[in-house]
Amino acid sequence: MKYYIFLSFLILSWSGKSQISTYIRPCMSISTIEKEGNFFKVINNSIATLNFSNTLKRVNIIPIKKPIASDTIFSEYAKDITSYLFNKDSNNLFNVRKILEFSEYASSDVQSFISDNSADKDQILTQIATEMLGKVYILTIDLKKVETYKDYYDRKEAKRKARNERTRKLGGEVSESNQKPIERKLYGYLCDFGFKLRQVNWTPEMLNYFYTNCWIDENTPEIDRAKKIDNFSKLQLSSKVVWEELQIDVSVGKSKSKRNGRLIEPTQEQMNEILTSYLPLGIINQTNKSIVQNVPEFKIFNVLSSTYPCKSKIGTKEGIRNNDRYFAYEKIQKRDGETLLRRKGVLYVNSVVNNEKDNSLASNFLQRGGRSLYNGMMIYEELDKKINFDFNYNHSTAPLNLSSYSLSIGFGPFGKRSAAYVGLSLGASTFQDLNYVYNYGGNYDADTATRVTISPDGYSLSVGLEFARAIYLTKRGNIFLYPNFSVNAGFLSFSNKDGEDQDFEDEEYEPSPVIVDTRFGIGLGFHIVPSVSIFYKPSIGVNIAAWESNANDDDDESESEFRTISEMGEDIKRSRFNFINTISLRIHI
Amino acid sequence: MKHFILPLFLIFTFSSFSQARKKANKDTRNWRYEIEGVGQGSMGTYLVKSWQYSKKPRIALEQTKKNAVHGIIFKGYPSSKGVIGQPPLARNPILDEQQKSFFDQFFGKNGRYMQFVSLTTDGTILPGDRIKIGREYKVGVVVSVQVAALRKYLESAGVIKGLSNGF
């Protein structure tokens, strides 16, 4: 039986490797580079002993996690992994139970169906195991620097003092904010590390050599065993680095509690807990994130088992999360027989199913753009950074438009069916002959103020904060409503007073108003391509507050005065309520 | 006018479904499908992948089942990828013409063919088994056909001869 299985391994690795082409869980062992230093040793030991199965959901973890020397020959390490995968026992006997166990866990429901209805139930599992052997990885984490928050604050404090000293020596004055000591709100650790991900190179030739010259089981004649043990000890398994990060920062900081207004220092127990549990977990989390984003073999792919509602039989077992992005592809065969994948739509995970025990359960996806999808189309994980850049053109008939052109950077989608977005915008606009009234000299006493009406040209700069949701109207998710609310502050700058000939250069007082507006609107959006969409966003803008200060006053501490909109001139008053038409182009990455 | 819209819509929808089914049945009769072995089935069953061709992107699962049973009776499948091929149950190449009325009923709507075939819970397709070729779609679904029971049924119906009849 075992001979048959191994023979299958060999045959399949040469001929039928493309038979399955489904997502195969990689096998990964985690090791750390040995280093002197208390923190390094504690973290390395924690990485070696902690169970990361909840973090590294989409891999089979090989529990060989000993710290290794930086000059370790990875062939030796790969051999340990081979011994684990082929379940080598104390008598040097191999078997395929472990790798078939992994295969069974990784199998899809179609594969389970084939296996259950096959005369040889292990055949399909053997196929999976064969592909799995091509995805055996060694992850080595190299800790570079670990420091406590206390050390970090000490360093910052020393820098601050040195900077202030330098300023004083140069005759400058240290600002008030720089005179205050660094606040020490957090406790915990900061860590710099790098990692390398190596793939063990299991070629068909290597597999053949291993089976012929190293494999021992109960059927192996006694006379051959010593030779085969020796062969295995000399076996050279090559590996190649498939991904590495030279420097990743991770910090685990917790807020210090307060007693009588004073920050309480953490206990040794609290610090140890972070060092031995939270920090190693943070390191593995960051590493996993980097690998999943950059190594194709770690990206999930599957087929749509049904559409509208879109479902695919993946879930917690594969470590998928809500709002992960997937692209749907159609396989196309050209006339010359060549096949290619053509992208057909974008899907986001809407609800994740727990499929640890039942691989026939399917997670829900929502389509957000593209063409009609059908059962059997392939979906590939393409995680996005959830960052949006919006280029907006705002048109308003009001005399004052705070931002005719604006650029927003936003984050989203978040949440479930209707995706939430939040964004920050920077805008600019110009105006001419704006009817504006100011109290000359900045005297805001209504009875004594000298009111001056001017018609300045100028420009406004605005900053804004927008909250929005996308509510998808169609099943394909190409068209969506976009209710949005934003708060903007526009800073007006006057370039002259009345046309070309009068400016503020010789005047003591130049009004510099800030107008705050809110905008409510319901936009209509359309996905052009997965990463680009356009919006039409009609909204109602309401100017809710205004301040005025003196632009010619060099004193930083001069206070601005609140002014009512209606007192600021006819144009500002007319701009209090306005209807704004916005056209936006969104690029999503 | 509006009283006519709904009935017209229903008639149109029904007739398009009916046309699609007729087209698929015609494809099966013309052997416009393929079957291939995907594993050695357990006792008395064959595990095959049934490929169907369709101009519509939606998969007609019932047609897939029909194709698989039709293929086992009339085509068989060759050896491939470590799976031993099987000859067709019908040794007479013109059996379908000779027993036309039987097979029309057998493969007809709610025909008996359904008793001998099963697929995954909802006919899930393996990645890569849905291919667009020109304007057509070629879709493969793995099904299990209970060959022993099918053979017995066809023998008892007198459509094919028993294995012992040749000796």
Image (cartoon, coloured by chain):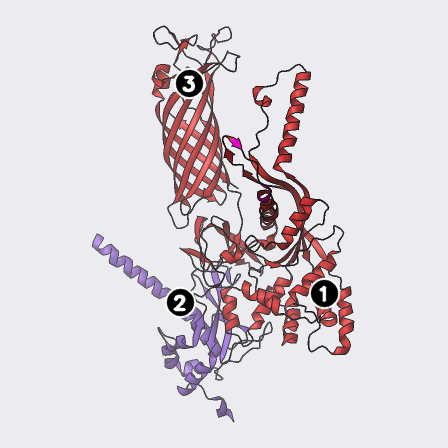
Chain colours: A red, B purple
How crowded pointer 3 is (Cα within 10 Å; few <14, some 14-19, many 20+) is rated as some
- Please name which of the two marks, 2 or 3, marks the residue nearer to the observer: 3
Q: Which of marks 3 and 1 is nearer the N terminus?
A: 1
* Callout 2 touching callout 3 (CB < 8 Å): no
Instruction: Read off the magenta span.
Output: A262-269
For this rendering, which residue is in front, B104 or A115?
A115
Q: Residue B23 carries which label?
A: 2
Chain bearing tag 1 is A
Q: Identify which residue is drawn at 67% across, 56% down.
A: A199
Q: Residues within 10 Å of mark 2 (few under 14, many from 20)?
A: some
Q: What residue type is labelled 2?
A: Lys
In magenta segment, residue A537: no
- Asked if the stretch drawn in magenta spans residue A263, the answer is yes
- Within 10 angstroms of label 1, few (less than 14), some, or many (20 or more) residues? some
Callout 3: chain: A
Q: Mark 3 points at which residue?
A: A547
Q: Where is residue A424 in the image (x, y as percent from the top left)?
A: 48, 32
Please tell me how many numbered marks the rendered image carries. 3
Give residue A36's position: percent from left, percent from top. Answer: 73, 46
- Looking at this rendering, what residue extends furthest in the bottom direction? B167
Q: In this view, does B69 lie above or below A586?
A: below
SS assignment at label 3: strand
Q: Determine the CA span between mark 3 and mark 1.
A: 77 Å
Distance Cα–Cα, label 2 vs label 3: 75 Å
Check disc 1 and report the residue beneath it.
A206
Residue B13: image x %, image y %? 32, 60
